[in-house]
Amino acid sequence: SSSSSSSSSIPSRKRSPSRRRRSRRKSRSRRDSRRRSPSRRRDSRRRSRSGRKFSRRSRSRRSRSNRYRRPERRSPPRRGPPRFNDMSTARREECGDFKRGKCTRGDRCRFAHVDGGGATSGGAARPELRGAENGERPGDWKCPNCGVMVFASKNQCFKCNTRKDGTKGTGMEGSGPPPEKYSEALWEKPRQQIGLKLVGELSNSAWQYVLSDESRRCFAAYLSCPFSQEQTKQYFNVIKDGTDWKQPEGPNGPIPRKTAWMVASNGCQCTYRYGRIEVDPTPFPPWMMSMMASIMPICGFPDPNFWPNSCNLNLYEDGGMSVGWHSDDESLFQGKLVDIRILSLSLGARRKFELRANWPDEPEHPKSVMLSDGDMMTMEGMTQKHFQHRVPKEGYVDGPRINLTWRWTVRHTPRCPLNRRR
């Protein structure tokens, strides 16, 4: 009884809730330390060495973020002679804007800046280009058939479509497979069955056909200047001063010519697009209509109702300005689907005009015509489907040249009012 009374008199010591939680944490930490994972041991070692806290949570986040990160690739140090950012004049072409004092690109210009004394602002030439006075680049090869120099990136000659080994090529690179032929001997349906009449048959002028391919139904005619020298000079000055010339930006900078796009004053608002270049339309000015009144009858179209309804104008200020190989096969003219006519007038300096086949049956050399002041040219039939044309660069030409090409717009753009009206 005495023991029971003494035990009952001693109060029982109860732990507070906070003290119980602390004891649980200590026991849990001891238990975890015994069976600590390798990552926990590594963290503890890092804490002991660095003397600072290391958050496991932040570490896991970093590991997850860096888990799928691609390691940086460091290129090995380059060996050999130092590179030059500038290129020699034998490698680069001369800048026409710098020659006229209008180049604003400075060192960023991809053409060579050559002053009147022949000095260039490009610095020293590369060691491998010191002997390339003839314009050859490393890797360029000589065509075994026609002897011209071809770029190293090309597999066949751009003139005769001959490969490096001397075998016959398939045609122009990048033109795709040739279209299906009408028969074994003919590419297209015969002209007599189509009823196509050429400009030389419609006109009384002495047109000379430099290209007459009945198999492809492709034709190109040339007419020597039918105007007086005073007329051509007047035409040149009126067109140059009365046209709002544009020089659009292409993927490689400004195109090497100035251009304008004019349409008939019948409500047409078709924009001229070729490649990544876009030119807004301008209605025919009064001088264009008066000029067409004297030029169209020479082409066999005396009735204004049958005149072309659009005109593309190009200004080449010198021989450095040009236009590369191309076809006027835009959807506006439908030149790949139907027979079309393109009428051309050249004014100013004498320049070369070339035509080449896309898929030649045999080694064919490009057709070349020298167009002088006042000369005219036509491309008829399916020429835009089977042929390409260009005006190459000619460094010895200093005078300006203006070229007008009249066309018939067959399919107007969706935003054009004439398309909606139809």
Image: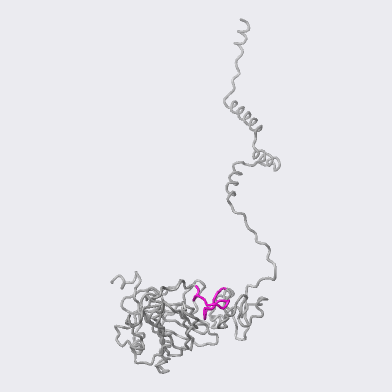
Q: Residue furthest front?
A: 184
- Horizontal relation, residue 51 to residue 218: left or right: right
Q: Nearer the viewer, residue 330 or 232?
A: 330
Q: Quadrant of the C terminus?
A: bottom left
Residue 168 on the magenta span: yes
Residue 189 on the magenta span: no
- Horizontal relation, residue 135 to residue 49: left or right: left
x, y percent for residue 72: 62, 56
Count of picture labels: 0
The range drawn in magenta is: 153-173
- Horizontal relation, residue 145 to residue 210: left or right: right
Q: Determine the residue positioned at 47% across, 73% down.
A: 175
Q: Determine the residue positioned at 63% across, 82% down.
A: 133
Q: Quadrant of residue 341?
A: bottom left
Q: How is the image coloured?
A: one colour
Q: Quadrant of the N terminus?
A: top right
Q: Nearer the viewer, residue 380 or 114?
A: 380
Most frequent secondary structure within the magenta stretch: loop
Q: Quadrant of residue 83?
A: bottom right
Q: Would you place residue 51 above or below residue 247 in this image?
A: above
Q: Nearer the viewer, residue 196 or 116?
A: 196
Q: Determine the residue positioned at 57% across, 48% down.
A: 65
x, y percent for residue 392: 51, 82
Q: Residue furthest right?
A: 49
Q: Would you place residue 28 above or below residue 49 in this image?
A: above
x, y percent for residue 209: 41, 88
Q: Quadrant of residue 346?
A: bottom left
Q: Nearer the viewer, residue 195 or 231?
A: 195
x, y percent for residue 89: 61, 80
